[in-house]
Amino acid sequence: MAKYRKKAILVEAVQWFEDGDHPNVKMIPLDRFENRQGADRRCKRCELVLDGIHGEIETLEGVHIVCPGDFIITGVAGEHYPCKPDIFKKTYDNEKTRTPDRSFLPEKVVEELERHIDKIRYRSMSHLVHVILLEWVEKQQKKRERLNNRKSQEEKTNEAMEDD
């Protein structure tokens, strides 16, 4: 089976605890659970009693129950759906406080990134990475130029020695 990585897209989300936390979540009416007893009165998702603390939201797949603490995510098409806090924390990072994945960058670039990160405020982390990558590429080009100049000088010296 093939493996896939979730695309890095920015989503809006709010953690829901009560009526009013998200405009699309409606409280579940209490009378819907009046006739239920024992385990039937408990939410199958969070195990809390279904009496005035749960909401529901219309999603692309139909109506879903929203438990206290669930995150309500606004998807790329403007749709809304609930997500359990543990799944949300494994899947999403807060854009303001996230630590970017630097594993794809060369080690020298990561060192430069760490050297600059506290000194300068950039518009975004991607802007900072872009600036540091440009600096790194320029350094690599200068190293190549110096190396080519040395080789060229050595060749001229060798030719001059052969002529003598």
Image (spheres, grey):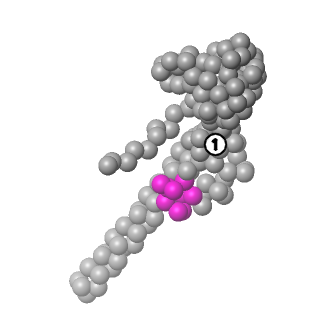
Under mark 1, the amino acid is Asp
**Image check: 69 left or right of 141?**
right
Residue drawn 60% across and 61% down?
111
Residue drawn 61% across and 54% down?
113
Pick the residue in front: 134 or 52. Answer: 52
Q: Position of residue 55 (x, y in %)?
A: 68, 20
Q: Is residue 37 above or below residue 109?
A: above
Residue denoted by label 1: 86
Residue drawn 51% across and 51% down?
133
Image quarter of the C terminus: bottom left
Q: Is residue 130 visible?
A: yes
**Image check: 159 left or right of 150?**
left
Pick the residue in front: 29 or 69. Answer: 29
Question: Would you call the spot at circle 1 few (<14 residues within 10 Å), some (14-19), or many (20 or more)?
Answer: few
Q: Is residue 74 visible?
A: no
Q: Tell me which corner region of the image, top left, top right, bottom left or bottom right, holds residue 128.
A: top right
Residue 65 drawn in magenta: no
Q: Is residue 51 above or below residue 94?
A: above
Q: Position of residue 130 (x, y in %)?
A: 53, 45
Pick the residue in front: 82 or 153. Answer: 82
Residue drawn 64% across and 25% down?
66
Q: Tell me which corner region of the image, top left, top right, bottom left or bottom right, holds residue 123.
A: top right
Q: Position of residue 92 (x, y in %)?
A: 59, 39
Q: Which residues are magenta?
A: 102-110
Pick the residue in front: 14 or 66. Answer: 66
